Amino acid sequence: MGEISPRVEWNPMRAFRKEDEEHLWFHDAVHNNPPISPMGSSVYHWPWGASWAAEEVSFPNSRGFSYVLYYGRIYPGVIQIKDEAEIRARARIFDEKIKERIDNFPKLYAQLVEEWKRNLEYLAGIDKSKLPLDKLLMVLKEAVRISKRNWALHFVMQYPGYLAYQNLVEICKKYGIEERDVRLLLQGFPTKMYEVDRALWRLVRRARELGIINYLIEEKPEELLSKLEKIENGRIWLNEFNNFLKLYGKRTQAAVFDVMYPTWLEDPMPVLNTLKTYALRGDYDFEALDRKIAEEREKAVQEVLKKIPEEEKAEFLKALKNAQNAYPMCTEDHNFYVEQWTYAELRYVILECGKRLAQYGILKDPNDVFFLTIYELYEVLEELIDDEKIGALHMTLRVRPLVEERKEVWKKLHDVSPPVVIGKVPETPVVDPIFIQTWGLTDEVIRGKVPLEVTDKLYGFPGSPGVAEGIARIILSYEEIDQVMPGDILVVPFTTPAWTPVFSKIKAVVTDAGGMLTHAAICAREYGIPAVVGTMTKGPRATKVIKTGQRIRVDGTNGVVEILK
């Protein structure tokens, strides 16, 4: 195989080219740290949705995002608008559209959810296994179209949601209120992602009520289901467990935007491992937590109101209401429908195509389909539709060695540490708030000016307030999540929405990547635990310095992590 080139050619349309060196691209370590599969790289639709939405709302400064592949990783980049006249013209349209959407956010978001659900239930209702190849190809293309559409809807509401949040932050600044304290004003609202975690805890409670809790604790997860089938109360619990999977199982705990990973519905082992550690913890009083978080929010609102002159309170309260309406959707709610459910339905169609190709002998295993791109899959299916015998003959000769070569490259790419940014860094400081809030890409990070000296203290963004001491648990990939035990302090490169169930059993969280609006920070605030995020923005990565088993102190109020011993 020789040395692996950074310009991995399994998706030539996205390979990093000479011309791309004139633009700034950043590694999206917050969402896709491992190398993405060839299929995943070709159905990576959030940049498409961002651009569609940017044009729909006439976002003044950019036309959304594009992306390239570098060492098999996703590197997005902003499609900037530099013409000042065009920026001013777009700003006038943008301001009008965004104001209307912020003021009517609940109604518009409800309509958006209905379309998301309608799109996805349509795909879920099709029995792909019974479709002839030509109809299966049509459904595949429809699944791709729906994925793009769902991402477009996602960003159409992200723009007003983010602006509602930023408007509240700016108003609070006038009264000396820091952004980290603004989060208290927005916490404690229900989302679909937290609904999943509560449903998991209900399953643990039901196991205790049915007298089978010891099975969850003592049995190996891979043997648990068969053991429960043999007892009456076990069968009752299994029925409830299967109903849980029907409602919430179309999600993965692996890389968020890669369709190659199985969902809980296909492989429930991650759920069973989570239930085991929940059972070991004992119980979790979500009702008390919800009351505590809501009380903290209302107390914070009253404290802010004391600082605001009477004649200016109406402006603040309107901005607060708008931000509270938008914040749950912009932080966690969309993950249930788009990042998880949408990619699950797309995966199911692609996997059915893989099963067909395996039946023809074109693939050794149905899962090998994820080492083709979507365009290559279209071509193989079209060849088979034209003539099954000749199509299978020609495609077997080409596809099998191609897949094996790519699988080998993909494995080797896991050992490569990709750079934070590639391409040309702008001469002027990079101060884009989205870069900083979501990805933690401060100007110092982009220019490689972060000090890397190792000491017993690490610094990052104060993601969630509070102080906690405990034993560190270093987790570097989704395969290791089941190692997280109750009371651990989780130290990770990043977290994704698929990791949300972990937060109800840990003391605190520390991440290498991300900013104040990253998933780990948002989740930690909702679960009332301290978080320091984005240590790579201030110094070394936490996962490179801290070792599993060390005792550490996490100060989420000030963004400091201290190694105690």
Image (cartoon, rainbow, N blue to C red):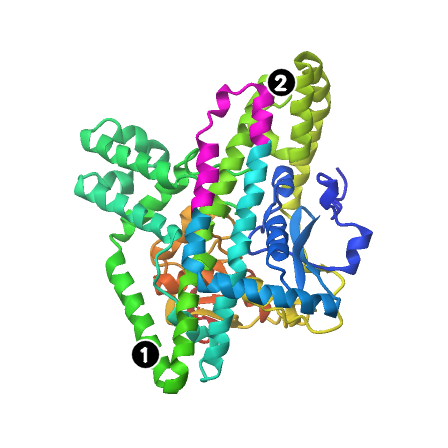
Q: Which residue is mark 2?
A: 361
In the rendered structure, which segment of residues is drawn in magenta? 114-140
Image point 66% across, 14% down: which residue?
Answer: 388
Residue 63 occupies quadrant:
bottom right
Please tell me which residue lies in front, 145 or 94: 94
25 lies left or right of 325? right
Q: Main secondary structure of the magenta part?
A: helix
2 vs 1, front mark: 1
204 lies left or right of 362? left
Horizontal and vertical percent position of residue 391: 70, 17
Please tell me whether mark 2 sits on a helix, a strand or a loop. loop
Check residue 133 for magenta coloring.
yes
60 lies left or right of 438? right
Please tell me whether mark 1 sits on a helix, a strand or a loop. helix
Which mark, residue 403? none
Instruction: Please state, as top left, top right, bottom left or bottom right, where the C terminus lies in the image.
Output: bottom left
Residue 415 can be seen in this image: yes
